[in-house]
Image (cartoon, rainbow, N blue to C red):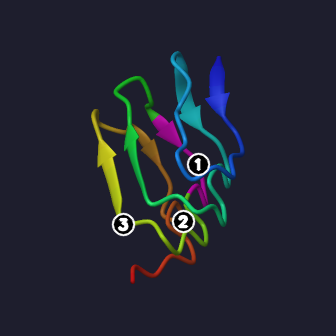
Amino acid sequence: MADVDRCLMCGSVIPEGAIAIGYGAFDSSGLQSITIPENITSMENRVFNNCVFLQEVEFLNEITNITDGMFYNYAPG
């Protein structure tokens, strides 16, 4: 199983074959927008924690496992 675990890049690319995005994967990154591909079905807690520049998240598929803390500590500007 390929997962996205931790990334600090602004222009993140989710690897082909990934099915989950792990805890705090984009924590405190400069991420501004991201498209979650259709192969991602699970996203853990605090994926977008402290992503103060994040403006847009596009989901290309239904997420079957999502936590209430996915956007923890996120306040859109």
- Location of residue 54 with respect to 65 vertically, above or below: below
Which numbered circle lies on residue 69? 2
Query: Mark 1 or mark 2, which is nearer the start of the sequence?
Result: 1
- Location of residue 8 with respect to 28 vertically, above or below: above
Prevailing secondary structure class for the magenta stretch in the rendered image: loop
Q: Is residue 43 magenta?
A: yes
In front: 43, or 33? Answer: 33
- The image position of residue 52, as x and y in percent, is 52, 75
Q: Dot 3: what SS?
A: loop
Disc 2 from disc 1: Cα separation: 8 Å
> Which residue carries the number 3 mark?
55
Please provide the residue range marked out in magenta: 42-47
At 55% across and 42% down in the image, what residue appears?
12
Query: Mark 1 or mark 3, which is nearer the start of the sequence?
Result: 1
At 41% across and 23% down in the image, what residue appears?
39
The amino acid type, in three-letter code, at marker 1 is Glu
Q: Nearer the viewer, mark 2 or mark 3?
A: 3
Query: Mark 3 or mark 2, which is nearer the start of the sequence?
Result: 3
Which numbered circle lies on residue 12? none
Q: Dot 2: what SS?
A: loop
The amino acid type, in three-letter code, at marker 3 is Gln
Disc 3 from disc 1: Cα separation: 20 Å
Q: Dot 1: what SS?
A: loop
> Which residue carries the number 1 mark?
44
On screen, residue 27 versus residue 76, left or right, reads right
Q: Estimate how packed mark 1 is, as few (under 14), some (14 to 19) or many (20 or more) residues with alpha carbons within 10 Å.
A: some
